[in-house]
Image: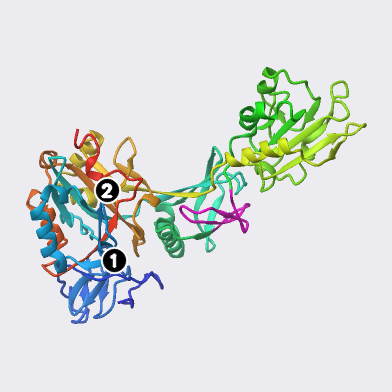
Amino acid sequence: MAEHTRTDGLPETMPAPDAAPQMLERSRPRNERMATDKIECNACPVLCQISPGKTGACDRYANAAGVLIRVDPVVLLRRTLAGADAALVPFAARSAEAQAELAANPLAMQDEIFVTGIGSGTTYPDYKPAPFIVASQAGGVDMVTVVTEGIFSYCSVKVKIDTDRWLGPEQANVRCKGEVVGHVTTAEYGSQMLSLGGVHHLTGGSKKEGRVTCDMMLALGNKQPVDLAIDGGAQIVIQAGRAPIVGGVEERRMRVGCGSATVGIFAKQFFGQADEVVVVDDHITGVLTQHQAGRCLDMRPSGIRIRGRKSTPGRYFQVANPGTGWGGTDLVDPLAIVEGWDDALAWPGLTLLMVSTTGEHKAWYVLDDALVPQPAEMPAPIRSVVERIGENCEASLATVLFLAGAGGSLRAGVTDNPVRLTRSIKDALVNVTCGGAPAYVWPGGGITVMVDVMRMPDQSFGTVPTPAIVAPIEFSMRLDDYRALGGHMAHVRSLADALERGAWHNDGAPTARRFEALPGANPWPLGQPPLLG
């Protein structure tokens, strides 16, 4: 069911589904102009009119002989997972097994399975309760988890790129397929940062800009590579959990520290092996004999003069322009930052190590009689310290954080008085997860969540062509707290019922599910304080 129904303003290509279908409520023609064999999908504002055997524009819903089906499975997390259990199976096909397992050991099974929002369906057009409102027990405590997929226009991805390489000026536009999809933001320690997506790129620009932005965010959320170009800067390829590729070169190391920190960390190991050490860095270049570390070791001043703006002793700003060379500068020859030597302090035979903050660039020099540095073979003890610098550098990775504001339709799927959900989250009565992964909820108004996509199951994200991102979200709380916030108590179902029938609005038709193992780095969603405290 990969073929689309044509609808004005929809993307020409979308990813094809590869999962068994999930049956949803039956739909009927909504107007006289629509062919009688089409059905209208109301899972998002686009309202696709879907012909038999075709999918809607999002590839998430299809028309199967007059029945609206969800083509993706619901993903369930399980603490322990045998290989065979990971297979895709219909809910009903294993309902007897699930019922028997729950009947034999109900508490253990309820502590074992967590229903995620992946593949669950949405609450659109807003008034519907969430597709799954599941009652269970955790540690003997009666719990409820409200499970849904959110349609997010107000969402973005924050990308942390571990590299000293200069990617582009702060605030520079980031482009994908020629369209502006974000910008460079403030650098952090050893990392460059991008802010991508957001409502203004999704809906505030041209139709093409919105489509490209949505596709880019979908790919990053689903851990796929994306090619980006930064105005006035680098061409990069980023993929969550992988090394970034900058200008066609795969990054290997994140710096151990700035130049000053590197001097301080390894000062005792350099002591007695080199007369002077300069650690070249775009931010703070360190000079050992002038640095407090060198002074405390009573090192003899070398008389070296460094180009740049002196900060505190042994620390220099702006020694060169940013770039992809030594220490994130544009330097090819590190001696370009050496302005000269004080002949009252320097001496022939003085040994000089110049090294970058990752140890990838290094050079060894000896001053000649004219106090000119001459390249020389690096001694083994110095080479060992340089290797130690590299050993202490973490692997360079790209980290993708999905950031979204959970607004009205999400909250209305939980309670008929949405502000109570917001207040309950702020009061730490509700644990928020995305695909079972822990989510950080930002302080202040609203429900603004942030989650590391690497902690979520694969293919957690989808799209609708409004354009917007579809992402899973779950709200877990004590049963009494759910009742107190005005939850949809009439739609609370047992875990056994959810395993047997799937989403409440599936009209009794068999649905698909997929088990995945809980990632080792993730806590169990129902086991977090204060839920069980």
User: Which amino acid lies under the numbered mark 2 shown in the image of this protein?
Assistant: Gly
Q: Is residue 52 at all visible to an observer of this figure?
A: yes
Q: Measured from the top left, where is residue 386 in percent x and y?
A: 67, 39
Residue 159 lies in the magenta-colored region:
no
- Using the rendered view, name the quadrant where residue 89 is placed: bottom left
Up-down relation of residue 506 to residue 519 (above or below)? below
Residue found at the very far right of the displayed protein? 369
**Which residues lie in the magenta part?**
228-252
User: Which amino acid lies under the numbered mark 1 shown in the image of this protein?
Assistant: Val
| Of the pair 531 and 81, the residue shown nearer to us | 81
Which quadrant is home to the N terminus? Answer: bottom left
> Given contact means CB atoms under 8 Å apart, are the residues at marks 1 and 2 in contact?
no
Residue 238 lies in the magenta-colored region:
yes
Q: Earlier in the sequence, mark 1 or mark 2?
A: 1
Residue to which mark 1 is pinned: 46
Q: Is residue 504 at all visible to an observer of this figure?
A: no
Image side of residue 501 versus residue 252, left or right: left
Where residue 455 is drawn, which disc sits there? none
- Using the rendered view, name the quadrant where residue 314 is placed: top right
Q: Mark 1: which secondary structure?
A: loop
Which quadrant is home to the C terminus? Answer: top left
Q: Measured from the top left, where is residue 502 in percent x and y?
A: 16, 62
Image side of residue 114 versus residue 191, left or right: left
Crowd around label 1: few <14 · some 14–19 · many ≥20 (10 Å)? many
Q: Measured from the top left, where is residue 214 in percent x and y?
A: 41, 60
| Of the pair 458 and 323, the residue shown nearer to us | 458
Residue found at the very far front of the displayed protein? 380
Up-down relation of residue 121 to residue 403 (above or below)? below
Residue to which mark 2 is pinned: 407
